Amino acid sequence: TLIHSQTHVCTTCPYCGVGCGVLAGDGGASIQGDPQHPSNFGRLCSKGSALGDTLALENRLLYPEVAGRRAGWDEALEVVAAHFAAAAHDHGPDAVAFYVSGQLLTEDYYVANKLMKGYLGSANIDTNSRLCMSSTVAGHKRAFGFDTVPGCYEDLEQADLIVLAGSNTAWCHPVLFQRIAQRKKTHPKLRIVNIDPRATATAESADLQLALQPGSDVLLFNGLLNYLRQHDRLDFRFLEQCAEGYADALEMARQTAPSIPAVAAGCGLAESDVATFYRWFADTEKTVTAWSQGVNQSSSGSDKVNAIINVHLATGRIGKPGMGPFSLTGQPNAMGGREVGGLANQVAAHLDWNDRDLNLLADFWQAPNLARRPGLKAVELFQALKEGRIKALWVMATNPAVSLPDSNAVRRALENCPFLVVSDCCDATDLAPYAHVRLPALAWGEKNGTVTNSERRISRQRPFLPAPGEAQPDWWIVSQVAQHLGFGDAFAYRSPAEIFDEHARLSGHGNGGSRPFDISGLAGLGEDGYDALQPVQWPVTAQAPNGTARLWSAEDFAAHGRRANLLALAPKPPAEAASAEYPLILNTGRVRDHWHTMSRTALSPRLCRHQGEPYAELNPADAEPLGITDGALVRLSSRHGMALARAKVTGGQRPGSVFMPMHWNGQHARQALVNSLVSPVVDPLSGEPESKAAPVAVQSF
Ligand code: SF4
């Protein structure tokens, strides 16, 4: 199998959660899809194909800086360690925090989490994955007792019905969408239902578009559950054998969504469309429901996830080929971050916050000071910073000044941060002006480690470029700070292979088959085995050395000694309603050719051509009374801030709502910061912000 051919290095795309295999040759001048990689079989989307355009060293941070001047690594590491030690000593361990990223590799993430939770003694490490799929984590935990994606990409090619909920798959997971489109060509029986207030590029391939009222997803899926009960389509054998809570869930569905007319009225849909969706779902055994941020980024995101999982559990359509509930993760390593406990409310190796698991972990890590309770989730963490409760913060590979809701307030909090460390591969970032210490990190093409994609597939990122300047891997930087803090022995890693080995051994430590996350079959690979590691889906154990495609069939529940839970869910509207002052509901999202805050994709002229500037999509029924014409400059405002954008007037936008992309920021368009408009309202269980339903006003500029 190809690892390093004569001309190419096999690696993994650094953008979305599809996790495509990439062949990089000639120092990145040649980029191709890896035909052997089971996530993409040679395909790449526009962003992946343009990776070669993004490798130049312009805007790279190449040397450590302390107080705005160039410093040596020793000095910078010592300053970081001294400030973190002093803050923890003077104010307690919860006065320090890390804010990390789904862009980190698993090995980086593992070491950062170990240092914070095991050695500094606080669980104040959270990640930008909080903004992406933490509602799914919460939903999985409630449904399965464990955060596991049950299915795999192949299920989408084996299904006869694909329901896409809150997911512009065509733009946000393009290669997966190409696989779906290919299946539709060769299998005309396949039907696609697209549930989205916007008629996105994904809608063009849908057999049925359900442009529902924003936030009404629980009502729609409760209605489906009730319909399945009324039409005798429940799998009681599966429910009795594997599940709890279904009587209450069914009763709640009956009460809240008693009929198709009631659902249609509540969701703002035509009765005939709701009836068609329900009939197709009831009649199609092989059904996958895939969702993304349109479901997750909500003050009731966890409930929406569980409403979807409910209908799959109720029909026993889970853990079998061509069927299941399927979360599409946004980032390349959101899943790997979950494996190492990178969220403030998670424990490494998907262990739990109980004495047995924590004692196992303390024993394995020989941790002197293991955190015993969850830490602050992203929005809480920056609120604590604003209130002066965080005295030392380290931000790794992410840009909270752009991506967090109420971003103006986040910037004010950063201004007052007593000690801020920023480790990043980029030089000019929105955080740079606030940083006391800056540490240069390696970028894609230089980094070496693993990521895990949406289908639990662990895949290698391999380097094919030399480290520029004095930039170092994130795992090295964190390990060095740990050593300066006096935790040398536990952080004496010499390579990512050693870290991965520890991670794999921890997953099997005291496991005995009770925890699905088990990659003990990948322990002991050594440097060569790690370098040669082929893409593989966890669990990977002695019994399943080649990985596991699906989980949570009836047999899996029995084998793991678990039962599923159906939840009784009362539909809730978004936390903030439209008003006379802010009459439109803002929905934020991605465009096809940019990634996050554009630090990489803006370097590619061809990627910038697709959407060249920030824009706001409005329905003609909203635009015309405001005198807004297509192409006009508009000003969006909310209780929290304002942003400028170019109007796109389109019937694809639901009346009463406005869409604006999330990418443009202080580096590229200072006045277009969409998250300055968004309230810091979160799902109470997951802490995920409501980025799809912010009341705003729009006017001509
Ligand atoms: Fe990269 Fe995602 Fe495109 Fe694949 S689909 S090439 S992982 S951005």
Image: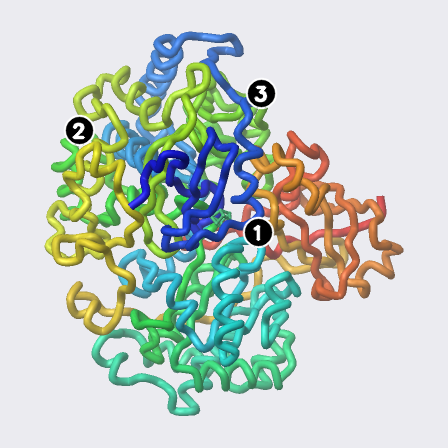
**Label 2 is placed on what type of residue?**
Pro
Mark linked to residue 433 = 3
Q: Which colour scheme is used?
A: rainbow
Q: In this view, does 49 lie to the left or right of 228?
A: right
Q: Which of marks 3 and 2 is in front?
A: 3
Instruction: Give the camera-side residue of 232 and 573.
Output: 232
Specify whether tag 2 is near ligand 1 (CB below 8 Å): no
Marks 1 and 2, the one that precedes in the sequence? 2
Position of residue 540 measured from the top left corner of the image (x, y, whole percent): 20, 52
| Quadrant in the picture for residue 107 | top left
Q: Could you tell me residue 486's position as x and y percent?
A: 22, 17
SS for dot 3: helix
Q: In this view, does 221 lie to the left or right of 240?
A: right
Q: Distance between the residues labelled 3 and 2?
A: 35 Å
Amino acid type at circle 1 is Ser
**Quarter-of-image position of residue 693:** bottom right
For disc 1, the neighbor class at 10 Å (few under 14, some 14 to 19, many from 20) is many
- Tell me which residue sits at (47%, 30%) in the image: 26
- The reply to whether residue 481 is visible in this rendering is yes
Residue 688: horizontal and vertical position, in percent? 47, 50
Kind of residue at badge 3: Pro
User: Which numbered tag is attached to residue 448?
Assistant: none
In the rendered image, the vertical position of residue 45 relative to residue 207, given as above or below: above
- Residue on which the image places disc 2: 368
Dot label at residue 691: 1
- Quick check: can you spot residue 89? no
**Going from the N terminus, do you reach mark 3 or mark 2 first?**
2
Separation of marks 3 and 1 at Cα, in angstroms: 26 Å
